[in-house]
Amino acid sequence: MAFNGSGHILHSIYWTIMAPKGQGGKPLEYTQKYINWYFGNFDAFKDQFISASNDIQGSGWGILGYNTAFLRLEVLQCEKHENLSIWGTIPILVCDVWEHAYYLKYQNNRKDYIDKWWTIINWETVEQRLLNAGQGLLRLFF
Ligand SMILES: [Fe+2]
């Protein structure tokens, strides 16, 4: 249940956080503010997310999550679909780094896939997911 259920959830998010026409745009207001608050600046977050995703041992996911217990964002490495997760975290932005996500086009060049994937993130969906996860709490901080 943990493996298949988590795999279903993460893939369902993954399909929605990529822009359909390859134009991801830029992070929206609350995403930008919250990332700046927790990670210092957007580039620091981007470096941490990409590094975490690229360094996962074997199959897994890079995840930007909103932890409802700590009321903050966190970058997680997830092995398979469910290992190394933390209770209370809602996945906001997820990057599939199983080989099936990139092998046909990028062979074993996971980093090239992640860099390209980054350019098609649908930041509008990320913003909505973050606002929904925070259930309005974020608006209290900014
Ligand atoms: Fe996958």
Image (tube, rainbow, N blue to C red):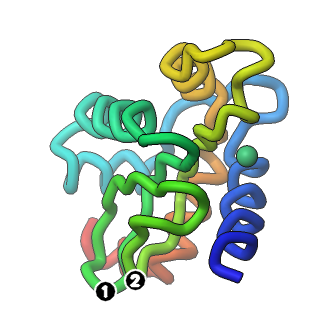
Regarding mark 1 in the picture, which secondary structure is present there?
loop
Q: Which mark is residue 17?
A: none
- Whether tag 1 and tag 2 are in contact, CB under 8 A, the answer is yes
Residue identified by numbered label 2: 87
As shown in the figure, which amino acid type bears the numbered disc 2? Answer: Trp
Q: Quadrant of the N terminus?
A: bottom right
Give how far apart the Cα atoms at labels 1 and 2 are: 8 Å
Residue 126 locus on image (x, y percent): 58, 53
Vertical relation: 34 (above or below) 133: above
Q: Does the residue labelled 1 lie within 8 Å of ligand 1?
A: no
| Residue at the image point whose x is 66% and y is 28% from the top | 120
Vertical relation: 10 (above or below) 27: below
Mark nearer the viewer, 1 or 2: 2
**Residue farthest toward the left in the current orientation of the protein:** 40
Q: In this view, does 100 lie to the left or right of 99?
A: right
Residue identified by numbered label 1: 69
Question: Looking at this view, is 10 or 90 the one in front?
Answer: 10
As shown in the figure, which amino acid type bears the numbered disc 1? Answer: Ala
Question: Looking at this view, is 19 or 97 the one in front?
Answer: 97
Question: Looking at this view, is 46 or 96 the one in front?
Answer: 96
Question: Looking at this view, is 141 or 90 the one in front?
Answer: 90
Within 10 Å of the Cα at label 1, are there few (<14), some (14-19), or many (20+) other Cα atoms?
few
Q: Is residue 31 left or right of residue 96?
A: left
